[in-house]
Amino acid sequence: MWKRKPVRAKPSPGGHQGWSDRSRHDAVEALRNALSGHRQLLVIAESGAEMMRELLGARSVTVSTLTEGHYQDLVNVGQLGQRDVRFPRDDVYMEDLYPVATQLLQLGKGYRSASRDDLVFQEMQRDTGEEDLGSVMGAPMVSGGIVRGEVSMRRGLDQRPFTPEDLQVLQDLATVL
């Protein structure tokens, strides 16, 4: 059986300052390699979230499914809010709690914001209740042309905001989950 050569993407505490095509490719390959031996959905989601958090320097990452008008969180990793647990059992909520973010995801786009005036930022801050929320970012997980879920990330005020390049990398990585 053919085995992929391991690729190590070089994470940095605050994420990359600039993503080259090669570093984006290396990040995707590193995530593929990390997930290749797993078969269970929660293990894949947890492993993927941990690696994405490390690669992009996020404070926390959530992997959620999106079906029939509702989100369901599979896993939360990193520094979690008071209401968050690593493996939520019944964290199901309607997509209309996040109308702007959901619309962007359903269009196959991601979102990122570090502005308290931005509607997406307001949706996420209202949900998390985090006073020190500095930046948010999310990308759709797409299969067969249908949005099946989302990978969302948060950074604190003490971290640099997510960049457009960070969002491109997250979109690349979300295709692997």
Image (cartoon, rainbow, N blue to C red):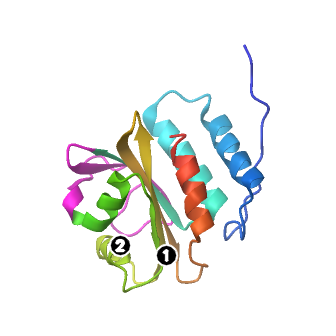
Please tell me which residue is depicted at 52% across the width and 78% down the height of the picture. 156
Q: Position of residue 148 (x, y in %)?
A: 36, 42
- Residue type at the position of mark 1: Ser
For residue 108, say whether it is visible. yes
Query: Residue 66, labelled with which disc?
Result: none
In three-dimensional space, the C-alpha distance between marks 1 and 2, rounded to whole angstroms, equals 10 Å
Q: Nearer the viewer, mark 1 or mark 2?
A: 2
- Residue type at the position of mark 2: Val
Please tell me which residue is depicted at 62% across the width and 50% down the height of the picture. 51
Residue 164, image quadrant? bottom right
Q: Position of residue 107 (x, y in %)?
A: 36, 54
Please tell me which residue is depicted at 33% across the width and 64% down the height of the picture. 101
Q: Are marks 1 and 2 in contact (CB under 8 Å)?
A: no
Label located before the other in sequence (1 or 2): 2
Residue 55, image quadrant? bottom right
The residue labelled by disc 2 is: 120
Q: Residues within 10 Å of mark 2 (few under 14, many from 20)?
A: many
Is-magenta flag for residue 74? yes
Quadrant showing the N terminus: top right
The residue labelled by disc 1 is: 135
- Highlighted range, magenta: 67-96
- Along the line of sight, the residue nearer the viewer: 130 or 123: 123
Residue 142, image quadrant? top left
Is-magenta flag for residue 175? no
For residue 98, say whether it is visible. no
Locate residue 38 relative to residue 97 in the image: left or right: right
The vertical placement of 43 against 105, above or below, is above
Q: Position of residue 95 (x, y in %)?
A: 23, 57
Which type of secondary structure does the marked residue at label 1 adopt? strand
Q: Position of residue 130 (x, y in %)?
A: 39, 78
Locate residue 120 relative to residue 17 in the image: left or right: left
